[in-house]
Image (spheres, grey):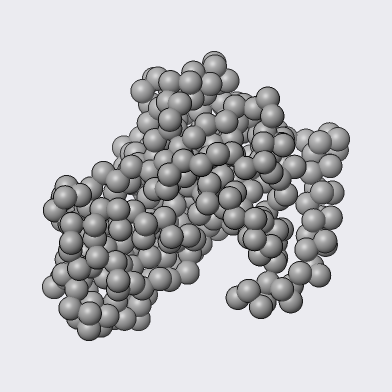
């Protein structure tokens, strides 16, 4: 993979030029963002996956609900097997499947019971979601680069581990690096959230300090809540899994933090099956998981909450295997200040 990124390096200036031109067209007013008749909170990042957008969206949904706002979520629906506008959930129930809407939005509506939709064209999607469900606030998932829709709050979430790893193949633009935009784009955000996940808090790196001056900077982390039985939806305490020999299954962008979290909960993680991000599990992968489970004499299968929404449809195939996901939630150190910041900007 690294060799391929090195080969693709000559295309980095081309990508950079295209992104610079696009942003200039918006900044100069030639391309115009459109209003949709509701308050808009955008959640996004400047890297390819793994920063914690979905946990932040869930955090925002719960915050807005507690404030009496009628909130909904709009996503592009990455990895879905459909196109166009799809209403994922209304006020009462989920209306589609994970295959038709994508794992991230399905995870969100399962967790929050919130109106949601997917649509590639965010302006049209937001208008239809508002009309279909009567919401007054839309959270845009993964929309920092999608500038066609006007927003009241532009939140940029960055992974601490990424920020503190200045490796050439990490902090470089696509297609050689992991960055969608360079650090100058941080200036466009209203606030920056540094997500340390399950790691210790570190100082803000200079490369981010330079572009986040006079901006709100918040610090977030993940808290492990428990392990949930995928088939029976029963939650168990963290302590009940200490020392348990589990087969770890992951299909997320950066499995490092997930593995780190399991180690902190004292789960035996020596046996792992790591798949690509947004893995679309098929019967073939399920058979591989079953084979590895018995070959390693594991006590259970432990996976992520995002993977769980896709693996749950194979309950029959896992009938003789205990399979759980690690339930986590995002927390913000400056909780009260963050709440006031959000409410002030959408009032």
Horizontal side of 141 relative to 244 (left or right) equals: right
Q: Position of residue 125 (x, y in %)?
A: 57, 42
Asked which quadrant contains residue 336, the reply is: top left
Q: Is residue 187 above or below residue 222?
A: above
Left/right placement of residue 301 relative to residue 129 reads left
Residue shown at the point (59%, 49%) measured from the top left: 163
Task: Residue 6: name its quadrant.
Answer: bottom right
Relative height, residue 48 to residue 55 (above, below): below
Viewport quadrant of the N terminus: bottom right
| Image position of 307 with respect to 32: above or below | below
Q: Residue furthest front?
A: 203
Depth check: give the residue in front, 182 or 278: 182
Q: How many marks?
A: 0
Q: Nearer the viewer, residue 98 or 54?
A: 54
Q: Is residue 150 visible?
A: no
- Tell me if I can see residue 334 in this picture: yes
Q: Return the x and y of residue 260 as percentages of the image width and height.
A: 37, 57
Q: Give the residue at x 17% y 78%.
A: 297
Q: 189 or 40: nearer the eye? A: 189
Rendering coords of residue 109 (x, y %): 37, 44
Q: Nearer the viewer, residue 87 or 80?
A: 80
**Residue at image point 43% right, 71% down:** 275
Quadrant (top left, top right, bottom left, bottom right) of the C terminus: top right
Left or right: where does residue 194 sit relative to residue 70?
A: right
Q: Residue at left 19%, top 73%? A: 298
x then y, percent, for residue 116: 44, 41
Q: Looking at the image, is 206 positioned above or below residue 295?
A: above
């Amino acid at each position: 993979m690294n060799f391929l990124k090195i080969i693709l390096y000559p295309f980095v200036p081309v990508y950079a030029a295209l992104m610079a031109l696009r942003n200039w067209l918006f900044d100069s007013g030639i391309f115009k963002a459109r209003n949709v008749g509701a308050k808009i909170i955008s959640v996004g990042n400047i890297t390819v996956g793994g920063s914690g957008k979905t946990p932040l969206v869930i955090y925002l949904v719960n915050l807005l609900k507690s404030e009496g706002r009628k909130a909904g979520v709009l996503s592009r629906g990455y990895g879905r097997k459909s196109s166009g506008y799809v209403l994922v959930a209304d006020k009462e129930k989920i209306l589609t499947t994970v295959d038709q809407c994508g794992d991230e939005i399905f995870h969100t509506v399962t967790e929050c019971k919130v109106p949601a939709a997917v649509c590639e064209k965010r302006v049209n999607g937001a208008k239809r979601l508002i009309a279909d469900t009567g919401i007054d606030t839309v959270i845009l998932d993964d929309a920092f680069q999608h500038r066609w829709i006007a927003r009241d709050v532009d939140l940029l979430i960055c992974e601490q581990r990424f920020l503190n790893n200045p490796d050439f193949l990490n902090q470089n633009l696509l297609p050689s690096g992991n960055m969608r935009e360079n650090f100058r784009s941080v200036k466009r955000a209203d606030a920056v959230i540094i997500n340390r996940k399950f790691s210790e808090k570190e100082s803000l790196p200079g490369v981010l300090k330079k572009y986040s001056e006079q901006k709100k900077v918040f610090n977030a982390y993940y808290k492990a809540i428990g392990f949930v039985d995928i088939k029976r939806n029963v939650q168990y305490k963290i302590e009940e899994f200490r020392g348990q020999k589990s087969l770890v299954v992951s299909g997320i962008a950066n499995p490092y933090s997930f593995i780190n979290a399991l180690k902190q909960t004292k789960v035996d993680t020596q046996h792992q099956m790591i798949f690509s991000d947004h893995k679309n599990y098929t019967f073939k992968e399920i058979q591989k998981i079953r084979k590895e489970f018995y070959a390693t004499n594991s006590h259970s299968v432990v996976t992520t909450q995002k993977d769980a929404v896709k693996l749950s449809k194979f309950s029959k195939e896992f009938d003789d295997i205990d399979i759980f996901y690690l339930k986590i939630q995002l927390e913000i150190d400056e909780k009260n200040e963050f709440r006031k910041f959000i409410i002030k900007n959408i009032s």
